[in-house]
Image: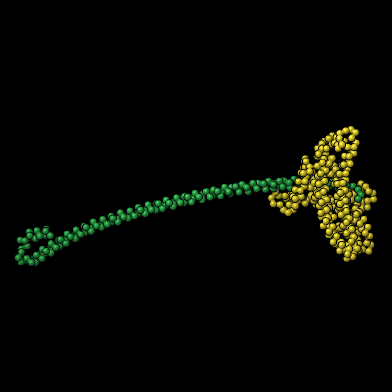
Chain colours: A green, B yellow
């Protein structure tokens, strides 16, 4: 444990190393540490904000779901009502068409019957005349009895 | 020669004395107690190397430092820096732009120098003896087990105490405090105040250096005594060397860290006191 000039060399090294640390080591590392403190603080704040936003959004979603359900119920009721209405209309239209068709068919049938009646009448008259002619061929002169035949035809 | 097996094996006391002798600039053992004409080359080289290793590792981290996810080395340095920063903040009230980095340097440097004690006792000396070709070459590898190394640092702290006293209080304020504190601002008390202040400054800086030196010197000496057990070249000596050496080395991990921490804390405390008036 002798003292010598090493002491002064050590003294010099002491200050040089401290200066070096002050200049090149301490500031960047402290800066990084402070930055990290800010980053963590920001991150925590952002997480808190996100949490409140999430709660808010969830509330909104529930509200929207409720609204959607309500409007769906409305739409269904409307659709049912409209469907019933359309069904009624269609039914009425069908009835109308059926009755129209029936009327038309009845009219046509009446006309056809009339015509058949007339044709039948004509033919009966002719048959009657023809029959009478045969019976009266020799006795009756067509010319003489023409007026009689015409009268008969008219009666039939 | 260090193992004690050679024909011309040294005696136990020769072995220890040899290991406690510095490699000086003259190449010979220092004869006078105080002799500023020579220096301990080994202490200077190893303290400089350890100081450079400490600050360069930190500078490496500082160059690649990120505020994002830190790597393991960065995290380790950050733990130390955070510890130093919080201690210096609690102890020193004032501008810490130099004091906190100084405390960090002191902690890292002293820790690295103390850690030299954990190297095998004869490793570097015998390498040096081989390299220099002189089988009696001296070499001590723990700079903090040299009073020059520790007192050099504590003198630095003493200069900083003066500097911060003058910076905070002004030259007049500091001189006034030297004469007027602690007993009181009376003319007949001036000599006693001054005497007590001189004693206080001397005691602070000498005890600061002596404490570290004493701890490391004693630790080194015990490693030497343990090595002598192995040097008996018997089974019991070898076993004791293994067991006791391991126990002491593990205990020494605590000591080197603790002494580095104490040196840093006292540096902060003494400089912090310079910031406060009596």
Q: Residue furthest top?
A: B187
What residue do we see at 87% from left, 57% from top?
B223
Q: Tell how many labels.
A: 0
From this view, report whether residue B182 is shown above or below residue B233.
above
Q: Residue furthest front?
A: B183
Quarter holding residue A154? bottom left
Residue B264 shows in this picture: yes
What residue do we see at 93% from left, 52% from top?
B29
On the rendered image, what quadrant is the N terminus of chain B found in? Answer: bottom right
Residue B210 percent across, percent down from the top left: 88, 48
What residue do we see at 23% from left, 56% from top?
A107
Is residue B39 or residue A118 the one in the foreground? A118
Residue B52 shows in this picture: no
Quarter holding residue B275? top right
Residue A34 percent across, percent down from the top left: 71, 46
Is residue A48 or residue B104 the one in the foreground? A48
What residue do we see at 81% from left, 54% from top?
B254
Q: Is residue B172 left or right of residue A62?
A: right
On the rendered image, what quadrant is the C terminus of chain B found in? Answer: top right
Quarter holding residue B93? top right
From this view, report whether residue B162 is shown above or below residue B47.
above
């Amino acid at each position: 444990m002798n003292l010598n000039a090493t002491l002064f060399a050590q003294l010099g090294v002491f200050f040089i190393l401290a200066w070096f640390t002050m200049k090149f080591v301490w500031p960047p590392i402290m800066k990084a540490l402070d930055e990290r403190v800010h980053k963590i603080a920001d991150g925590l704040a952002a997480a808190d904000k996100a949490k409140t936003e999430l709660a808010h959004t969830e509330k909104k979603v529930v509200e929207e779901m409720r609204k959607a359900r309500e409007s769906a119920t409305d739409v269904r009721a409307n659709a049912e009502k409209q469907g019933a209405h359309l069904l009624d209309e269609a039914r009425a239209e069908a009835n109308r068409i059926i009755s129209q068709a029936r009327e038309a068919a009845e009219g046509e049938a009446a006309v056809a019957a009339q015509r058949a009646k007339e044709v039948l009448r004509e033919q009966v008259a002719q048959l009657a005349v023809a029959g009478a002619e045969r019976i009266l061929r020799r006795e009756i002169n067509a010319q003489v009895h023409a007026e009689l035949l015409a009268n008969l035809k008219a009666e039939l | 020669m260090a193992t004690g097996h050679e024909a011309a094996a040294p005696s136990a006391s020769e072995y220890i004395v040899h290991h406690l002798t510095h490699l000086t600039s003259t190449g010979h053992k220092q004869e006078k107690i105080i002799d500023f004409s020579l220096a301990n080359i080994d202490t200077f080289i190893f303290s400089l190397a350890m100081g450079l290793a400490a600050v360069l590792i930190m500078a490496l981290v500082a160059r690649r430092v990120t505020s994002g996810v830190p790597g393991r080395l960065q995290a380790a340095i950050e733990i130390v820096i955070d510890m130093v920063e919080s201690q210096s903040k609690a102890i020193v009230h004032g501008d810490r732009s130099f004091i906190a980095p100084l405390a960090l340097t002191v902690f890292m440097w002293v820790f690295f120098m103390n850690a030299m004690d954990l190297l095998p006792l004869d490793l570097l000396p015998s390498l040096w003896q081989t390299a220099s070709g002189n089988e009696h070459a001296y070499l001590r590898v723990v700079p903090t087990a040299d009073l020059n190394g520790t007192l050099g640092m504590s003198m630095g702290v003493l200069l900083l105490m003066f500097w911060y006293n003058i910076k905070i209080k002004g030259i007049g304020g500091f001189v006034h405090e030297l004469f007027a504190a602690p007993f009181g601002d009376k003319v007949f008390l001036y000599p006693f105040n001054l005497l007590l202040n001189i004693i206080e400054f001397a005691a602070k800086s000498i005890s600061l250096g002596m404490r570290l030196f004493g701890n490391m010197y004693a630790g080194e000496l015990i490693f030497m005594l343990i090595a002598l057990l192995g040097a008996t070249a018997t089974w019991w000596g070898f076993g004791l060397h293994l067991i006791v050496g391991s126990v002491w080395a593990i205990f020494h991990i605590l000591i080197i860290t603790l002494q580095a921490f104490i040196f840093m804390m006292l540096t902060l405390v003494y400089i912090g006191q310079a910031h406060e008036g009596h």
